[in-house]
Amino acid sequence: MEDLGVGIGWRSEIDLSVERMAGVDFVEVVAENLHTDHLPESLRVLRERGVPVLPHAVSLSLGGAEPLDTQRVEHLAAVARLVDAPLVSDHVCFVRAGGLDSGHLMPLPRTREALDVLVANVKTAQSIVDTPFALENIAALLEWPDAELTEARFLSELVERTDCLLLIDVANLYANARNLGTDPAAMLDELPLERLAYVHVAGGVEVNGVYHDTHAHAVPQEVLDVLGELCARRRPPGVLLERDDLYPTDAELAGELASIRDVLAAHA
Amino acid sequence: MDEPWGLSGEQFLEIYAAAMFAPLMVAAIGALVIRRLADRAEPFDHTNLPTTYHLAYLAGGCARLVETVIAELTHRQLLRINGEGRLSTTGSGTDKPLDPLEQEVLDTVQRKGTPSASIVVTALADGPLLGLDRIQEELLRDRLVVPAAWRMRVRRTVAGLYLAVLTIGLARLIVGISLDRPVGSLLGMLFGVLLLTGGALVAAKGLTQEVLPTRTGRAVIEGATADRPRRLSLDADSAALPAIAAAVGIGGFAAHPDVDVRHALAPPSAPPASSGDSGGSSCSSSSGSSCGGGGSSCGG
Amino acid sequence: MSREELAEQQAALLRALLAGGEVPPGFDAERLRVEADALLAKRRRVVAMLRPDLPEALGARYRELFDTYGRAHPRHVGTGMRADANAFADWLRERGEISAPPKRSALARLLRRRD
């Protein structure tokens, strides 16, 4: 994997801020929010400057047992061509089932059967998209019963069988540790980090004892600590800050990017 | 021959011709006189204005005032602007207490989600603005604006005079027709009266605009305009804040010194935006971007 | 377990979370409630972002009214978020919670189109 550096999620609400912020080495765009016929002006400026733009999908429902909606994959492929992306991604999850749309990333049962379905869908998606595909671990508030594999094993086999890359969200590792009692360090030990594409960092908030990965609050130190754990094992090719709502000042966003750089520097 | 009202047709037309122009004169002279009457005896230094918001309101009324508050809050990072000119709050705290106007702009942005700047300007400039009373009072106290009541009085006088002239003309027309006299010339003159009413409106234009600066007021705007480039180029850090607000206060969004922000707030393709950069002479009436011209709809 | 069975299990989970369905066997009911609330909250936020005129008009009642609507009308596949937001507006109008189509949002759309 080529070195991406430190980046931030591009969102139209903060387009000028992202465009003008110092030290943004790459950006990520939510693929579903872009039209394939024209690029927002700010992204065009960033592309002209040579800043990589990585499309990130949220709706492919790659873990869904119903037939894959290939139109959504085609859209992702078109967006990737539009921004000349080195890499695209989506999540290890399902989004739709039985005619209902959850509008969010739902966890998969960690069974052989579910893994087979996921692998088949990922292979179909890979055949449509021309760029390398990365898959991201999600934050879950609930767990399926009767798991046959650990999450790390599940992800490792997925990588083995599809040759996809990993997009590790350390905020999701932290959220799962808080809500489901998983151990981020143990999971990092088991993951094939040599297949790491980049890392997500995001903030959240605790409500009634449950940690919500909101992407709308400051990044807690604990999430940076998980990033540190990861860096201690392998230097990630890139780290990206995700902020999706309640955008703070430019100064605060820049401060969070600087904190990420500090963690990277501490493990250089 | 018994002449109606003791005046021959010719005599009436002569008098009527003079009467036709009287309200026009009243309008023109009225506008001039009240500006002078409201003037300060001695010059007023623009740096003595309590805030840049006073300058903005003086130069462009409510819409300009709101534009300036937006520019100021954006600069202080309490508001963020995106590339499409949409505003959002940053939730940032502030070391300086907020002016009621600033609070109102922040609340409006918050309430409307991520509204475009022009929506916020329109929404606020149309309604009663908190804190506007104080600005109006202080500008009046410093004799930088002509009191609205004076302008209203002149406007009413001019309108009343035209109503009278029209009524007399119409009455004479009816009398003329009933006596079977030729009324062609009178009809022509009545048409002329209508034209002149329009003329009087133009002559009294200043009387209907939202804010009418006195001569001193216009000098204050010119002084601030001349001062602007110097402030911007000199100590950029300490003076940047008043400089940005002052630039927008004088010239609207189109004069925002930051080119990216300017393009977001006032896209260059927009209607023939009376370029706020023109600097110098006549800023007082240039209606910037979204002012909506005439009417004093500001409330407050 | 076949792919069909997995599809049915996923559907049953979404029904429980979004459409008042029963808690599928083996799941923690309390966890499902937390997840259901989180999904509804996310949908509520997105609708507010797409139709800021609605929370503006409803004020503090927005949340309660949206939640009533959202629970009774889960979003179906093929209904975009914008259509969902507009359907909520129609629902409010039918119940007399808001009046005539809001002028402002039409104006906002027009302004957005211009640039």
Image: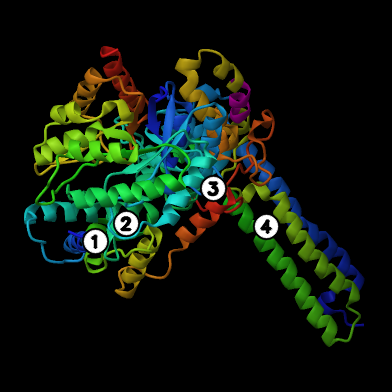
Discs 2 and 1 lie in a common subunit: yes
The answer to whether A63 appears left or right of B249 in the picture is left
Of labels 3 and 4, earlier in sequence is 3
Q: Which residues are magenta?
A: B220-227
Q: Earlier in the sequence, mark 2 or mark 1?
A: 1
- Label 4 is placed on what type of residue? Val
| Front-most of residues B170 and B107 | B107
Question: Label 2: which residue?
Answer: C55
Give the alpha-carbon distance from disc 4 to disc 1, as whole Å: 81 Å
Q: Viewer-proximal residue, B118 or C41?
A: C41
- Image height of A120 relative to B137, above or below: below
What chain does badge 3 belong to? B
The amino acid type found where label 2 is placed reads: Pro
Amino acid type, callout 1: Ala
Is B164 situated left or right of A32 in this image? Answer: right
Secondary structure of the residue carrying tag 2 is: helix
Structural crowding at the residue carrying mark 4, measured as other residues with C-alpha within 10 Å and reported as few (<14), some (14–19) or many (≥20): many
Dot 4 and dot 1 within a common chain: no
- Residue located beneath label 4 in the image: B158
Majority secondary structure of the magenta segment?
A: helix
On-image quarter of the N terminus of chain C: bottom left
Which secondary structure, mark 4? helix
Residue under label 3:
B148
In the image, residue A206 lies at what x, y percent? 15, 39
